[in-house]
Image: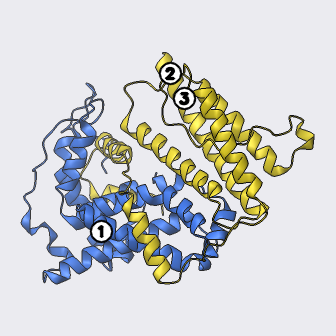
Chain colours: A blue, B yellow
């Protein structure tokens, strides 16, 4: 589940932040900066862009927190702002290049990832990170939103201004790309025997 | 929000084991803090846009800043001689001269006592193991950063802070110290086996 959900902030701190208290805002920033930056970095891959998006996200938090009513968790609210900012960035970058979000796969070749397995090796997190980074921007965002942040295809479609089919298609292509490095190291499992339940 | 399993079945690109491995792997990737300069940029922009209250001098609680400094000095004196090198300690602003009878304590003082006890418990744990999971290191570092940020706020004599404010910040400090202690305790238990 998303790391945003694990972060709790005292409602009194939120109230103080709503009144413009810089100390309360710094506490909120320190609590959520890492997951916000991580989302932005995974979407953009460029630290300078991710830092700008972190800045935009927390400025938006400061502008809007007085309207935050607490119906959802603070983390979910901040995550939504960060995701929206990051997707707007992707969209504008693609618009500038005269391409649409759907053109994302044209420059890449399917099946680039290499097989290492994930389970017990310290390097596996790095391998998965690298494989994720090699996905096209939009597919990477869809994988992250769906499998880490828990968004549904309907929600992803809404965020991207696309259809649910678009989200599913991106996810499917991303899975096919990532599949070679998901060879489960359990001896009882044959990586290519997709006879069990499929996802 | 939530998983839409029927959609996943339609996607049909991964086996159940592969799908579980992918989710576990993705969710296990550690978060990274942005550079410290980012907060300063945010604060500068927020001040320029008038989003923040102006700081004013703290009134009527200078005893507290003095007590914090004295406590820090006392703790430094007590800890440094003969102490093994430790991990970065959370803030050391807890006043030492509080009543021991809890019935005499205000809520704020109770939180201070709890905070002091948690720091003692933290120091009594063995040193951190040399090899730690990256995720654990990041979480510990994150909690220590957040505690340090609160200590910075509590120790800043330049700002107004009512007793209610102080109570709020001390409560948050106790909560974070609790989380840090639980994490370090679990880590020490794992290292023992």
Question: Dot 3 corresponds to which residue?
Answer: B186
SS category of the residue bearing label 2: loop
Q: Position of residue A38 (x, y in %)?
A: 35, 57
Q: Which residue is mark 2?
A: B84
Which residue is at a point 52% across and 80% down the rendered structure image? A63
How many marks the image carries: the answer is 3
Q: Residue at x 76, y 59 (%)?
A: B61
- Kindly identify the residue that appears in the image at 28 percent across and 75 percent down: A89
Using the image, name the chain to which the residue with label 2 belongs: B
Q: CA separation, marks 1 and 3?
A: 40 Å
Q: Are marks 2 and 3 on the same chain?
A: yes
Give x and y (percent) for residue A147: 36, 55
Q: Chain of mark 3?
A: B
Numbered label attached to residue A167: 1
Q: Residue at x 74, y 44 (%)?
A: B112
Circle 3 sits in a helix, a strand or a loop, which is it? helix
């Amino acid at each position: 589940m998303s790391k945003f959900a694990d972060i709790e902030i005292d409602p009194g701190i939120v109230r103080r932040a709503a009144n413009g208290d810089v100390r309360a805002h710094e506490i909120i920033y320190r609590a959520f900066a890492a997951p916000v930056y991580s989302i932005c970095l995974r979407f953009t891959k460029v630290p300078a862009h991710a830092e700008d998006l972190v800045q935009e996200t927390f400025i938006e938090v400061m502008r809007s927190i007085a309207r935050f009513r607490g119906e959802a968790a603070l983390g979910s609210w901040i995550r939504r702002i960060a995701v929206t900012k990051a997707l707007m960035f992707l969209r504008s970058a693609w618009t500038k290049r005269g391409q649409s979000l759907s053109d994302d796969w044209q420059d890449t070749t399917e099946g680039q990832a290499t097989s290492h397995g994930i389970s017990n090796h310290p390097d596996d997190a790095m391998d998965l990170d690298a494989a994720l980074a090699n996905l096209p921007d939009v597919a990477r965002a869809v994988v992250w939103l769906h499998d880490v942040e828990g968004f549904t295809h309907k929600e992803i479609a809404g965020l991207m201004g696309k259809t649910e089919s678009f989200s599913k298609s991106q996810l499917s292509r991303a899975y096919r790309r990532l599949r070679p490095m998901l060879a489960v190291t359990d001896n009882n499992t044959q990586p290519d025997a997709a006879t069990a339940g499929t996802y | 929000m939530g998983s839409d399993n029927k959609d996943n079945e339609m996607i049909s690109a991964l086996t159940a084991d592969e799908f579980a491995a992918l989710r576990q792997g993705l969710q296990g990737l550690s978060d990274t803090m942005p550079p410290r300069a980012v907060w300063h940029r945010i604060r500068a922009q927020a001040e320029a846009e008038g989003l923040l209250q102006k700081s004013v001098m703290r009134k009527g609680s200078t005893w507290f800043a003095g007590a914090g400094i004295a406590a820090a000095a006392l703790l430094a004196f007590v800890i440094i001689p003969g102490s093994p090198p430790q991990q970065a300690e959370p803030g050391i602003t807890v006043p030492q001269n509080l009543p021991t009878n809890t019935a005499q304590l205000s809520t704020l003082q109770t939180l201070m006592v709890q905070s002091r006890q948690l720091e003692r418990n933290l120091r009594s744990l063995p040193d951190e193991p040399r090899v730690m999971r990256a995720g654990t290191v990041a979480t510990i570092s994150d909690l220590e950063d957040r505690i340090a940020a609160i200590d910075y706020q509590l120790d800043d004599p330049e700002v107004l802070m009512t007793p209610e404010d102080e109570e709020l910040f001390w409560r948050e400090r106790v909560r974070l110290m609790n989380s840090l202690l639980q994490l370090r305790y679990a880590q020490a238990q794992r290292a023992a086996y």
